[in-house]
Amino acid sequence: MQERFDAMLGTATAAIAAAEDERALRDLEVKYLGKKGEVTALMAGMRDVAPADRPAFGQKVNALRDEVTAAIQARRGALEEAELARLCEDPTFDATLPVAAFGGSPRVGALHPLTVVSRHIEDVFRAMGFLILDYPEVETEFFNFTGLNIPPEHPARDMQDTFWLNDGNLLRTHTSTGQVRAMREYGAPLRAIFPGRVFRYESVDASHEHTFHQCEGLMVDKSVSVAQLIHSMKTLLSSIFERDVTIRLRPGYFPFVEPGFELDIQCQVCGGRGCSVCKHSGWVELLPCGLVHPNVLRHGGLDPNEWEGWAFGLGLSRLVMMKYQIEDIRHLLGGDLRFLAQFRQG
Ligand code: DAH
């Protein structure tokens, strides 16, 4: 028996050492260690061995398998090194090229879920005739506060903890900054959305980030209504969630709208029965909105006797979390590829 084993090991190691490339090596791997391989077959032959001899037999087969495995690994390492050495000699080899050029498969990237949802929102509003506008993240106090009917010393300034810059500017605390900018830039009538990043000086936990995403919307015309606003919001949410969503409207206070509302959606994680995401209320606050305050229209250069408007400030990060059932906001900007790879499509 020992001779048979030795003979097999001898043939195997000789063949492995002579394998010229990875393909030949893989064939040998299958020949000896595969499901129907020779070493595997030896193990199956255990049946025919006398019970008393079985432990010794098993040990021998295992030792043989380990030696064949080690020989294959050693040969594979040597082949890889030889290949590298060859490439280094090759004047046409460019070490800065991606792995694909090296015979490996390139890693396929994917759009971030925030990008996917943001583009979806843009598509919905573009179809309704809205402009998609992009405004600065570093803002003046005027566009972030004063222009939105939040004068200095107004207590509402404390509702949003602000990152102030040394030069007196700030990192915008909301995308509402685009309202007065857009009115001044385009006049009325006007329909626009402004998606983007916003910043708050907050301590970070599962539902708070210092950096997150919103999408502001603004519609100004001769005569607008809350019914229009609700209809547009329902159209948007049904499209994002690909089904009819139940919403509710509550009064909400924001200095730049009058009346102001909190638009909640029924929790998409638990279907309204109550879970940790909706804090067991069945509802999630997603979309504050309202009719534009006359002072904001004035700051935008529009006469409130002539024009009316509605506005909303969609919590984009929260919407993404609802859509994909992400329970911790820190995943969104955490940069962990294992998290992001889950959103790879196709
Ligand atoms: N900018 C507000 C925030 O971030 C949200 C908001 C409320 C936006 C009401 C609006 C609105 O356009 O009408 O807290």
Image (spheres, rainbow, N blue to C red):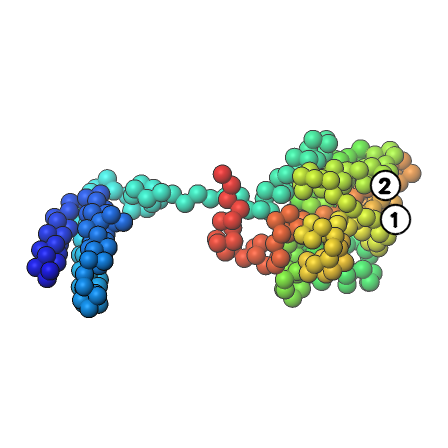
- Asked whether the viewer can see residue 327, the reply is yes
Mark 1–mark 2 contact, CB under 8 Å?
Answer: yes
Rendering coords of residue 168 (x, y %): 69, 59
Disc 1 to disc 2, C-alpha distance: 9 Å
| Disc 1 secondary structure class | strand
Residue at image location 74% in from the left, 37% down from the top: 235
Could you classify mark 1 by the number of other residues whose Cα lies within 10 Å: few (under 14), some (14-19), or many (20 or more)? some
126 vs 313: above or below = above
Secondary structure found at label 2:
helix
- On the image, the x and y values in percent for residue 96 come to 32, 46
Label 2 CB sits under 8 Å from any ligand 1 atom: no
Q: Residues within 10 Å of mark 2 (few under 14, many from 20)?
A: some
Task: Give me the residue at 18% from left, 67% from top.
Answer: 53
Residue at which label 1 appears: 259
Quadrant of the drawing holding the N terminus? bottom left
Q: Amino acid at mark 1?
A: Pro
Q: Earlier in the sequence, mark 1 or mark 2?
A: 2
Q: Is residue 186 left or right of 118 when viewed as pictured?
A: right
Q: Position of residue 230 (x, y in %)?
A: 81, 41
In depth, the one of 159 and 13 nearer the eye is: 13
Residue at mark 2: 226
Residue nearer the viewer, 222 or 104: 104
**6 sits left or right of 273 in the view:** left
The residue sitting at 30% across, 42% down in the picture is 103
Q: Is residue 144 visible?
A: no
In the figure, is residue 20 to the left or right of 132? left
In the displayed image of the protein, which residue is found farthest to the right? 305
